[in-house]
Amino acid sequence: MKLSNSRFTFGVLLLMLMLHISSFSQSKKQQELEERRRELQREIQQIGSLLFEGKKEQKSVVSVVEDLNFKIKVRKNLIGITNQQTNLLTREINSNQTKISKLREKLKALKTDYAKMIVKSYKSRADQSKLMFLLSSTNFQQAYKRLQYIKQYANYQKLQAELIKTETTKMQQLNSALVIQKKNKQALIDANKTAKSILDKERVQQESLIKEIKNNLSQFTAQIKTKQRESNKIDKEIKKIIQAAIAASNKKAGKSTTRKVFSLTPEQKVLAANFTSNKGKLPWPVTNGVVKLRYGNNPSPIDPSLTIKSNGVRIATSKGGQVRAVFEGVVQGIMTPKNGNNTIMIRHGNYITIYKNLSKFYVNKGDTVTTKQAIGEVITNKASGESILSFGIYKDSSTQDPSTWIYRL
């Protein structure tokens, strides 16, 4: 009886533990999805305020299509995340319904078993019956075993009563959770319907603009190619400055000037190590912004045959938005090309961060800067009304993907 009782208790505890772990895992995943959904909602709001509000009259068709394509992409991600949440909730609801059904069956069996025990206890309720049960033993050992049996039986009754109470509470909690989950699921379904309705309108607008562009595709393609050439030219100048700085560091250290990596002083090694240890945790170079163009090769939304190469990211921010250093370091150089893509380069050991498209500088070459220190302002394009910061990271003379370095970029 004792062994059976222990196995039963262990089985119940193991089942409860497994259900708790499964529930915790699903809850954590749901929280992660909800956090990501809210991030995308905030991003869409920022896109609206930074790229669309009050600027439609000024923008070129190309800019509008690029921004609209970007907005559609983010909204698709939002719909996808919401679908994941809905599917997860559906699985949780089905799981809870199954648990409730099993609990009902279990409670029914427990109550039936408990009722039988109560009836049996009632029939042998007199203390005299228990005493006679003990006195009728043939020897002391049998009497001891019968006494133990009486105690175990009484404990088993208590355990059954507690189990019924626990399982009843658990079922009530599951029923309450089920009601909330169904409400949350309906709210997500309604939110997705709204998002899909807006997406359909944006797609119609996009298709209309694409038709307009196709009539003068060669003209718009030429504009994109011109912008790419200008960007490539500035990137080459940046690389030249970095290579010159690498050569100077090696010359000072008495090493070959043809080396492609910096020779670092002990202080610069510490700075580079600190920069590396903050990978994925560096602050944004602006306080308010959305990433309009990612690192690497990006297909053009205007002409699919064209690829826009980016050595960094382009971040749309507010008009007159301040640019800040993402980490402590020394201003390596300042570029002021004729096309207005003014650039600040900050060195962090063997890492260099690039801040392009500035209208004002708050620092000079050789200045020491701190993390989040304002170093300038983003220029606002008069034709489009947009304020775009181009931001990049180099390790020695090789470009890095900023999204792996900047927190939630």
Image (cartoon, rainbow, N blue to C red):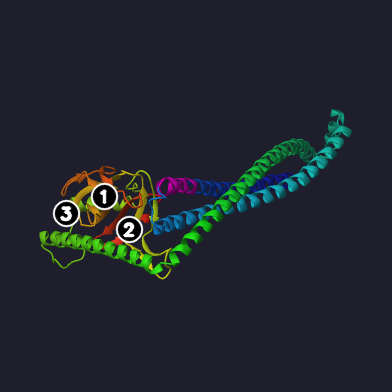
Q: Nearer the viewer, residue 286 or 232?
A: 232
Disc 2 element: loop
- For image coordinates 46% across by 55% down, the residue present is 68
C-alpha distance separating marks 1 and 3: 31 Å
Location of residue 408 in the rendering, given as x and y in whole percent from the top left corner:
41, 50
Look at the image and tell me whether residue 29 can be seen.
yes
- For image coordinates 86% across by 31% down, the residue present is 125
Residue at which label 1 appears = 358
Density class for disc 3 (Cα within 10 Å; few <14, some 14-19, many ≥20) is few
* Residue 47 is inside the magenta segment: yes
Which residue in the rendered view is the most extreme toward the top? 127
What's the residue type where badge 2 is placed? Gly
Disc 3 element: loop
Q: Nearer the viewer, residue 332 or 51?
A: 51
Determine whether, in the image, residue 249 is placed left or right of residue 185.
left
Q: Magenta span covers which residues? A: 40-54
Residue at which label 3 appears = 265
